[in-house]
Image (cartoon, helix red, strand yellow):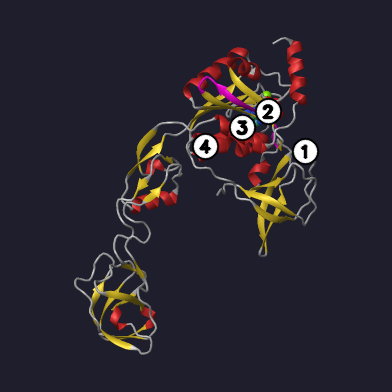
Amino acid sequence: MKPTDSVSSQVEAHNRPLLPVAEALQQIREAIDPIKGNILCHLKEAYGHIVANDILSPIAVPGYDNSAMDGYAFHAEDLSDSEAKTLKLIGKSLAGDPFDGALHPGECVRITTGAMIPEGTGFVVMQEQTTIDGEQITIQPEHKIDAHIRRAGEDIARGGVVFEPGQKIGAAELGLLASLGVSEIEVIRPLRIATFSTGDELASLGQPLGEGQIYDSNRYALYGLIKELGATHIDMGIIRDTREAVASAFEEAANIADVVITSGGVSVGDADYVKETLERMGAVNFWKIAMKPGKPLAYGKIGNAWFFGLPGNPVSSMATYIKIVRPNLEYLAGQSATVPLRLTVKTIDPLKKRPGRADFQRGILSYEGDELVVRTTGHQGSHVLSSMSRANCFIALSAESGSVAAGEMVEVEPFGTTL
Ligand code: AMP
Ligand code: MG
């Protein structure tokens, strides 16, 4: 690229209008398609992965009528709405040791929580509501038919759809599948994501810091974010700013991964070879997003891999990933769409802002008495990574919004909570 071209393309990029967050999300979503390919895995290995096909229940849950309480089982004919009744105790049904026989009018059976309901049972009375005198059990009137009985198939019918494709497997899903006796499921193969950092100022952990050097933190923040996603991370480390190093890194990454994510080197005015290589190798858009922190974002395709070039500043890099890249990675991975939970709460602190870009300020949600309120983490510089760590939410201020006074209501997005 000749110097004059570089200057004119920088001027052009500088004048381009800012792209709203929602539009960037939409444009990417329209261009990409979920990956193909399923794997069969044991239940524990399915954790964090995405269900590939409808999972049908091989059994009914509960598998048999059982008691919701510790108490006594009675026949329906012994229901009374006016008088107390005294019935004869004829046996017991314990969890794992059912009553062998049937219950008739005038009789009752001692029963524990989860134990099988004896044949002939019409209702269960909790033990606190009974009077026991040897084998004579007395109950007061006004019990209801079916009381404290969990019916077979009440939770899940046999053959019913337990999970649809797109469901992410978490702890509750593992437990539920185990309760059905399912030991293996088919999940979508994990997304392969290669990451590397660019910049000659970056030092790897374990190296002493030279003058003007900083440790490569984006590599580790991205590692955590990709781990949370359930994807396979291919960590390519730091790539030096030489034409050859950058070109071969991109080629290798595009060959082995579904997605390549870099950080740094995509801002206007960068001297890096990243942009030059991207322009040569692929179809990549260099965007300026109307968000803060963040702004530069490169997105496109290199070889067969989707490409995201995050800004270098650590907070911008995380925020851009969370707000724009992650939802699209989830889509690529086959996961059903989620939206961040948004709450409206009072800000204790005044919040400085200029209209123009959507702000995702770092905030700390806490209770003041019964009221959920938010405070700022303080300095909002895009290099202040401790703000991301101290924060438990983004304070989302719209592009149009200006500064906010203490006591006003603002919208917050708690970290890690989606619907
Ligand atoms: P750039 O986007 O390359 O212009 O970088 C913007 C700022 O982010 C510079 O101050 C870089 O030193 C810093 N930066 C870039 N990459 C990283 C990284 N991997 N870890 C920490 N800081 C970074
Ligand atoms: Mg750089």
Q: Which residues are magenta?
A: 293-304
Q: Using the numbered discs, state the Cα–Cα distance from disc 1 to disc 2 in whole angstroms.
A: 16 Å
Residue 374 left/right relative to 303 = right
Q: Using the numbered discs, state the Cα–Cα distance from disc 4 to disc 3 in whole angstroms.
A: 13 Å
Identity, as a three-letter code, of the amino acid under mark 2: Trp
Mark earlier in primary sequence (4, 3): 3
Q: Which residue is mark 1?
A: 356
Q: Which label number is shown at residue 287?
A: 2
Q: Characterize the local packing of mark 2: few (<14), some (14-19) or many (20 or more) Cα atoms within 10 angstroms.
A: many
Q: Is residue 217 visible?
A: no
Q: Which label number is shown at residue 27?
A: 3
- What residue sits 19% from the left and 71% below the top? 100
The x, y position of residue 58, in whole percent, is 30, 50
Q: Which residue is mark 4?
A: 331
Which one is nearer the viewer's eye here, 66 or 266?
A: 66
Q: Between label 4 and label 3, give the one nearer the viewer.
A: 3
Asked if the residue at tag 3 contacts the one at tag 1, i.e. Cβ–Cβ closer than 8 Å, the answer is no
SS at circle 3: helix
Q: Characterize the local packing of mark 1: few (<14), some (14-19) or many (20 or more) Cα atoms within 10 angstroms.
A: some
Residue 61 left/right relative to 295 = left
* Residue located farthest toward the bottom when viewing the structure as drawn: 83
